[in-house]
Image (cartoon, coloured by chain):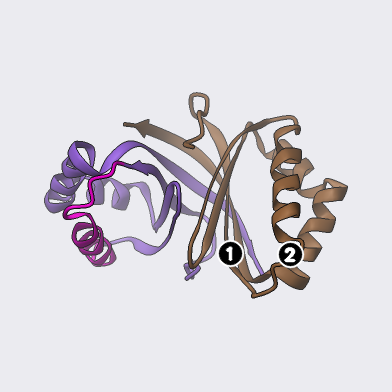
Chain colours: A brown, B purple
Amino acid sequence: MIASTPPTPYYAVIFTSIRTEVGEGYEATAGRMADLAKEQPGYLGVESARNEMGITVSYWKDLESIKKWKQNTEHLIAQASGRNKWYQQYMTRVCLVERDYEF
Amino acid sequence: MIASTPPTPYYAVIFTSIRTEVGEGYEATAGRMADLAKEQPGYLGVESARNEMGITVSYWKDLESIKKWKQNTEHLIAQASGRNKWYQQYMTRVCLVERDYEF
């Protein structure tokens, strides 16, 4: 679903990734991280799609919210598993959303 | 493929969409727009994934490049077809990429 975000400005974290062939634990952890993110202060929504590559965009009120989520203990463990097992390559981009328009 | 972008800052356009069931002409136009975007001044790369929803993120040098691409005549026609035929709903977000880190 397209995230229903507040008026700009707000922040987006674009996470693009290429998976390994290791699937073990991935779906459970991804689901848990999605649930946990929703509970964080400043969380505004998420959008996700995957075929050959995955793109997950999460939306946040400010940089402080993003920094806290990045350093969340359970999330740090998941990030380490991601690097060790599930992702061949990824890129994270932290962005200020200046304008948006919808149809 | 994960886009190889220059050092920050640069711009991202996050385009998230839900398709209709109309497929006619979509693939050809999407392919043509991807090729045409690559020829535009200030274009830096693109990433795209789709399952239930589609997310395409294109990267640009500056706001001026984004504005010119948005107003490109062939692109304007494709955008109108998108609203008339292919998309139930979409959101476009124009963002300043402040930081990025990769694995």
Please state if B85 lies on the left or on the right of A50 as rendered: left
Q: What residue type is labelled 2?
A: Gly
Name the quarter where the C terminus of chain A is drawn.
top left
Residue at 75% across / 71% down in the picture? A85
The residue lying furthest to the front in this view is B21
Q: Name the residue under label 1.
A: A17
Residue A7 location, x and y as percent? 48, 24
Residue A18 location, x and y as percent? 57, 69
Report which quarter residue A81 is drawn in.
bottom right
Q: Does the magenta stretch include residue A2?
A: no
Q: Is residue B28 magenta?
A: yes
Please state if A94 lies on the left or on the right of A32 as rendered: left
Please give the label number shown on residue A82. Answer: 2
Please state if B86 lies on the left or on the right of A27 as rendered: left
Q: Are marks 1 and 2 on the same chain?
A: yes
Chain letter, disc 1 residue: A
Residues at marks 1 and 2 touching, judged by CB atoms closer than 8 Å: yes
Q: What residue type is labelled 1?
A: Ser
Residue at 12% across / 49% down in the picture? B73
Prevailing SS of the magenta stretch: helix
Closer to the camera, B3 or B31?
B31
Please give the label number shown on residue A25. Answer: none
Total numbered circles: 2
Placement of A9 over or under B94, stated as above or below:
above
Closer to the camera, A49 or A61?
A49
Instruction: Please state the extent of the stretch shown in magenta in the rendering.
Output: B20-40
Chain letter, disc 2 residue: A
Placement of A89 over or under B23, stated as above or below:
below
Q: What element carries label 1?
A: strand
Residue B43 location, x and y as percent? 33, 62
Placement of A67 over or under A54, stated as above or below:
above
